[in-house]
Amino acid sequence: MKLEPLTLEGRHVRLEPLGSAHAEALASAAAEDRDTFRYTVVPNGLEDATRYVADLLEGRARGETLPFVQRDLATERVVGATRFMTLRVEGARLYAVEIGGTWLAASAQRGAINTEAKLLLLRHAFETWGVVRVDLKSDARNERSRAAILRLGASFEGVLRHWQPSLVVGEEGLYRDTAYYSITAEEWPECRERLAARLR
């Protein structure tokens, strides 16, 4: 199933379809302070950002992912990226999806942007596409990411050992343990209220 690019907008953040013209802005956002990016693939410099964008656009063309840039509406700056991925289809129906590949510039972290972006993505997945489940996952060592996922209202499902290649620089050829979380359609109304309350 190939999903068409779309824009999702709230009061704090606009999720725009990723395009090749975003490479420079993403490189700038990623350059602020890289200490929080240890477990996440985040481009480092313009050349890397150009490759990063090209790879994601190829994935979108193959129907494997739907990537966005995150734009801070207060400043109109691109401050990071996120995407729908791991699309699971039965017949013509998209029944489950993962939200991942998320990162934010240091100046945009710990504010309303991440909360609202997740609300926009989850609302679209559950209320427009009608999925029954949304996955979220993290390197099992990434306590900050795991705490943020729990704050969304997701349920912890366990740790899958050696689930995928490590994304940590210097760990090429090694495999990471992955902490898995989910939100189901039945849990979505309560989760939606939790996120809305946090934004208020």
Image: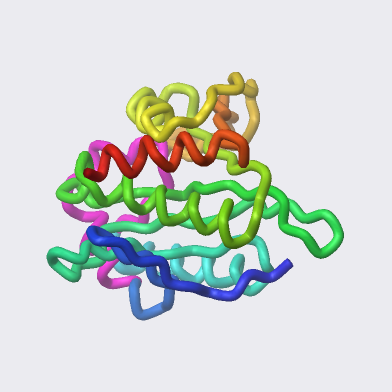
- Find residue 119 and report its horizontal and vertical position in percent: 40, 49
**Identity of the residue drawn at 35% across and 49% down:** 103
Instruction: Based on the picture, tell me whether residue 43 belongs to the magenta stretch.
Output: yes
The residue range painted magenta reads: 23-44
Most distant residue in the right direction: 91
Examine the rendered structure and indicate whether residue 19 appears above or below residue 107.
Answer: below
**Identity of the residue drawn at 55% across and 30% down:** 181
Q: In this view of the protein, which residue sits in the foreground, 60 or 134?
A: 134
Q: In this view of the protein, which residue sits in the foreground, 107 or 127?
A: 127
**Identity of the residue drawn at 64% across and 23% down:** 160
- Looking at the figure, which quarter contains the C terminus? top left
Most distant residue in the bottom direction: 21
Q: In the rendered image, which quarter is residue 120 located in?
A: bottom left
Q: In this view of the protein, which residue sits in the foreground, 154 or 49?
A: 154
- Find residue 129 and report its horizontal and vertical position in percent: 63, 60
Instruction: Based on the picture, tell me whether residue 110 belongs to the magenta stretch.
Output: no
Q: In the rendered image, which quarter is residue 44 located in?
A: bottom left
State the count of labels.
0
Q: In this view of the protein, which residue sits in the foreground, 171 or 134?
A: 134
Examine the rendered structure and indicate whether residue 131 appears above or below residue 76.
Answer: above
**Identity of the residue drawn at 62% across and 41% down:** 185
- Find residue 174 and report its horizontal and vertical position in percent: 57, 30
- Looking at the figure, which quarter contains the N terminus? bottom right
Q: Is residue 195 left or right of residue 123?
A: left
Q: Is residue 100 left or right of residue 163?
A: left
Q: How is the image coloured?
A: rainbow
- Find residue 15 and report its horizontal and vertical position in percent: 37, 65
